[in-house]
Amino acid sequence: MKYIDEYRDGRLANGIAHQIAAIADAARAYDFMEFCGGHTHTIARYGLEDLLPDNVRMIHGPGCPVCVLPMGRIEAAIALAMRSEITLCIYGDLMRVPGTSGSSLLKAKAAGADIRIVYSTLDALRIAEAEPEREVVFFAIGFETTTPPTALALKTAIAKKLGNFSIFCNHMLTPAAIHNILENPDARKLGTIKIDGLIGPAHVSAVIGTKPYEFFAEKFCKPVVVAGFEPLDVMQAILMLVRQINDGRHAVENQYIRAVTRLGNEKAQAELANFFDLRESFEWRGLGALPYSGLRLRPQYEVYDAEKRFSMVTSRARDNSACECAAILCGVKKPAECKLFGTVCTPDTPMGSCMVSSEGACAAHWTYRRFRAKGRLADAGRAVA
């Protein structure tokens, strides 16, 4: 497939790996965090860590919006969906995210809740149009990448005067999370992490551009390279980071020039500014409550805000005490270091969000068998291979 296979050329990947090995200083370690779960899956799927020298280590970051959505928001959505007049429209990867006491949206649906999986915001709008007697709520979730489609849905609903459509807004902003991780190297007492540089998210950056990362490079003296999702993209980004470290530089570089610019998609940014305001605080699983890290509908659109329309209550819910999702999301631990991983926690029986999402670190390590060399799980790896 043109423009895909070219970025998956094993010969070229090995060539970049040799370049990294040739310039990596054996007297020091290089610790790089990939923020995005798409990069985590690329690294696991193509075995990129196996190509790197031992002193170049990849640290998995927050991953994806499903991974970092706090349990309390899931519980609020379940309570909403159980109301007889509500049709809750959600993306499929939310269905099995665990709530408290083993609850989930999937179990709520089995208990009679009208929960429907949609593939786009427009699907939810079509349901609202086709069933005017139902209150249709779209569970909006995502980083900056999926926020423009929510704005489009709101704009369309207003134009069509859909009085039975509303949005449960759970959009989060990646720069706030990056700032939190870099400013708290102790990862909120979960453990200490060393980060020498960052691989910046790809699709997020197509919307917001590379400019927001310049602050992190300047304040924390950390190089940032925005990279695409293909294996050669990631390998080239690692090479660029190693070169910056060796040169004593800390700049923002753009490897993903075919999709990302410095200023990003300014039209999309203008639409977001029109429909959304910053929340003063929003809770992230693993990172806690972060200031100005989430979005909400602006006051003039409150009639479309499900939280206000249905007086939704979001309380803080505790994660499973044995689940290490918080430490994994911060990069303090690897998935296989959680005692639940691969035993009671698998994609079929997830105990935490990192195993549910298609971009979660635990799901990546399980799907691509990256845990096989881990002592107690070696036999499990052979059993499912």
Image (spheres, grey):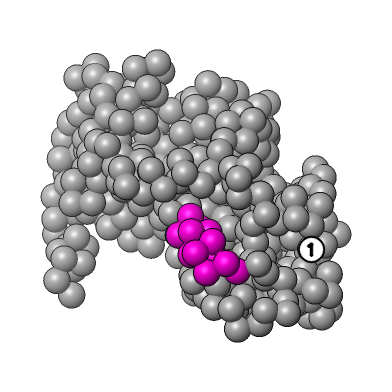
Q: Nearer the viewer, residue 292 or 106?
A: 292
Picture residue at 28% right of the left edge, 21% below the top: 250
The residue stretch that appears in magenta:
149-162
Q: Does residue 127 show up?
A: yes
Residue 46 vertical placement versus 300 (above, below): below
Report the quarter where the N terminus lies.
bottom left
**How many numbered circles does the render carry?**
1
Residue shown at 60% from the left, 83% from the top: 130
Image coords of residue 295 (percent x, y): 57, 42
Q: Is residue 252 above or below residue 66?
A: above
* Residue plotted at (86% across, 59% down): 101
Assess disc 1: are there few (<14), some (14-19) or many (≥20) residues with their C-alpha within 10 Å of its C-alpha: many
Across and down, in percent, residue 54 comes to 35, 38
Say if residue 192 shows up in the picture.
no
Is 151 magenta? The answer is yes
x and y, in percent, of residue 84 in the image: 84, 75
Q: Residue at x 32, y 47 (%)?
A: 267
What type of secondary structure mainly makes up the magenta span?
helix
Q: Is residue 80 left or right of residue 93?
A: right
Which residue is most to the bottom? 130
Residue at numbered disc 1: 80
Side of 79 where 214 appears, left or right: left
Q: In the picture provided, is 101 more to the left or to the right than 21? A: right
Q: Please, what is the three-letter code of the amino acid marked with disc 1? A: Leu
Residue 103 shown left or right of residue 95 in the figure? right
